[in-house]
Image: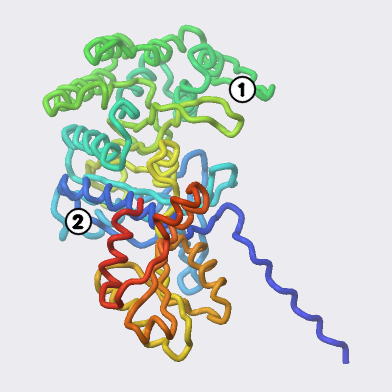
């Protein structure tokens, strides 16, 4: 009988395009999301946790740059009924389903926020993952642009609440109706060509006015030397686009006047400009000036379901890229009005508007500003000097926990005490508790300030070390009080 081939061991690796989040990352993200939720809650929005799985039919064809509804998502077919299911690729499509399914139970307008992971079956790359976090807030059932104005104001407040200072961000607002007016003024009616024009406009920040002119015409060479085919418009057809993209003035009034000129006689374009004028008036009345929110024609947003105002939050401070070159951090949030999305389920127009924050990008921005370093204080570690006295050590940890102090008992092999302190260092513990038989007999306990000890080892002279020891003995009944004092002075 042939010998059965041994099954190879699985390789311990994270799947391509995914990553693992450890303690400090999770803690940091939760702290930021809590601050965001506080702002959303203050604005009257309620939390919603919808299913991570949707039918492909419910998700629809709204992934950017794909032709098939299950292209770009992680999808599978059910054996019993043949339905295709998929992991959600954003938080908006599930909201449309929820709004339609529970329309008789939910208040109208319905204001919700949600936070969680989404999944996209796309080619991963540097900084581009197949699973990432989003944080959304939406209002369903409000046709007035006052709802869009509120989202923009809330977005500005949110950025400041998490630590982005005023002057380091700007929320930029535009209107897809204005874009439709520009297309009308150009005489471009073919849907595919309209999509190509919109995608070209969206590249204005990267290629500039000259690059957009080339891409609207015959095409251009990109930085790598590859030739990119253009839309094929004449210079005359392209002119309204250029007028639109360069219409931003020194203030909102001048910008709006330039936009009216860019849309010409287009009715839908004029309607879009009026919407922007209303938004600008409402923002000014609430005290949101151009240092926080501006009308900016260069904002396009790539998704096809936007029907009205669109907005984007951009961080304006400089960072250094991987090659040491200075550049602006860029966009961390975006959204807009999508009045036709719920209609797919109900057949009736349901107005909706909302914003999505890229959680990972916003965290990266806070780290770049030096406000979050991706580290978190570990627990107080109660070391074990005698296995037979485990109950005493557990009581110490319980006393600390009951006082609201994070604490744990060392549960590894206690034979080598040095390994216990190494464990505490790896856990980034601020304090280690030590009690041997001698201390227990006298009702005392040793408290080792690990943060101070590390500082002394690096910086202090012998005299300073003697005058400020990092370890001292205190009565057992003073354990909680003494540990609390150390934690209060630990940064």
Q: In which quarter of the image is the N terminus?
A: bottom right
Name the element at disc 1: strand
Residue 31 in percent (x, y) is at 32, 53
Q: Nearer the viewer, residue 392 or 23?
A: 392
Q: Which residue lies furthest to the left in this view?
A: 285
What is the CA distance from the residue labelled 1 to the residue labelled 2?
Answer: 46 Å
Residue 444 sits above or below residue 112 on the image = below
Residue 308 in percent (x, y) is at 28, 31
State the residue at coordinates (48%, 28%). Answer: 199
Left or right relative to 218: residue 461: left
Instruction: State the mark number for residue 229.
Output: 1
- Residue 99 in sight from this viewpoint: yes
Q: Which residue lies furthest to the top in this view?
A: 236
What crowding class fits label 2: few (fewer than 14 Cα within 10 Å), some (14-19), or many (20 or more)?
A: few
- Residue 57 in sight from this viewpoint: no
What crowding class fits label 1: few (fewer than 14 Cα within 10 Å), some (14-19), or many (20 or more)?
A: some
Quadrant housing residue 173: top left
Residue 253 sits above or below residue 174 on the image = above
Left or right relative to 391: residue 275: left
Residue 187 sits above or below residue 404 on the image = above
The residue where tag 2 is placed is 103
Residue 242 sits above or below residue 223 on the image = above
């Amino acid at each position: 009988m042939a010998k059965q081939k041994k099954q190879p061991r699985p390789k311990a690796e994270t799947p391509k395009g995914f990553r693992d989040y450890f303690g400090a990352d999770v803690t940091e993200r939760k702290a930021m999301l809590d601050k965001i939720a506080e702002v959303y809650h203050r604005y009257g929005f309620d939390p919603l946790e919808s299913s991570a799985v949707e039918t492909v039919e419910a998700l629809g064809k709204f992934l950017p740059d794909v032709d098939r509804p299950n292209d770009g998502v992680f999808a599978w077919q059910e054996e019993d009924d043949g339905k295709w299911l998929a992991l959600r690729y954003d938080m908006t499509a599930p909201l449309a389903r929820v709004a339609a399914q529970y329309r008789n139970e939910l208040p109208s307008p319905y204001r919700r926020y949600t936070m969680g992971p989404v999944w996209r079956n796309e080619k991963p790359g540097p900084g581009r993952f197949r699973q990432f976090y989003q944080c959304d807030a939406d209002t369903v059932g409000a046709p007035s642009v006052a709802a869009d104005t509120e989202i923009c104001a809330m977005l500005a407040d949110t950025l400041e609440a998490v630590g982005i200072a005023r002057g380091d961000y700007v929320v930029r607002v535009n209107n897809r109706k204005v874009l439709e007016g520009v297309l009308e003024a150009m005489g471009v009616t073919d849907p595919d060509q309209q999509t190509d024009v919109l995608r070209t406009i969206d590249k204005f920040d990267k290629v500039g006015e000259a690059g957009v002119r080339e891409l609207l015409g015959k095409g251009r060479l990109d930085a790598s030397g590859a030739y990119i085919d253009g839309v094929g418009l004449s210079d005359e057809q392209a002119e309204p686009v250029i007028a639109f993209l360069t219409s931003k003035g020194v203030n909102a009034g001048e910008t709006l006047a330039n936009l009216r000129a860019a849309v010409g006689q287009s009715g839908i374009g004029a309607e879009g400009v009026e919407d922007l004028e209303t938004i600008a008036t409402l923002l000014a009345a609430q005290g949101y000036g151009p240092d926080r929110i501006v009308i900016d024609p260069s904002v396009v947003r790539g998704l096809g379901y936007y029907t009205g105002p669109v907005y984007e939050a951009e961080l304006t401070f400089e960072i250094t890229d991987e090659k040491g070159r200075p550049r602006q951090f860029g966009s961390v949030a975006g959204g807009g009005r999508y009045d036709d999305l719920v209609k797919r389920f109900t057949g009736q127009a349901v107005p909706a508007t909302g914003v999505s924050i890229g959680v990972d990008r916003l965290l990266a921005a806070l780290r770049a500003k030096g406000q979050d370093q991706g580290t978190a204080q570990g627990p107080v570690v109660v070391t074990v000097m005698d296995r037979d006295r485990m109950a005493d050590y557990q009581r110490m940890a319980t006393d600390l926990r009951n006082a609201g102090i994070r604490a744990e008992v060392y549960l590894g092999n206690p034979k080598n005490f040095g390994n216990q302190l190494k464990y505490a260092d790896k856990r980034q513990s601020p304090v280690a508790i030590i009690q041997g038989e001698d201390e227990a007999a006298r009702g005392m306990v040793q408290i080792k300030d690990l943060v101070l000890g590390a500082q002394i080892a690096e910086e202090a002279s012998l005299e300073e070390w003697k005058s400020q020891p990092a370890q001292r003995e205190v009565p057992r009944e003073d354990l909680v009080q003494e540990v609390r004092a150390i934690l209060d002075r630990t940064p």
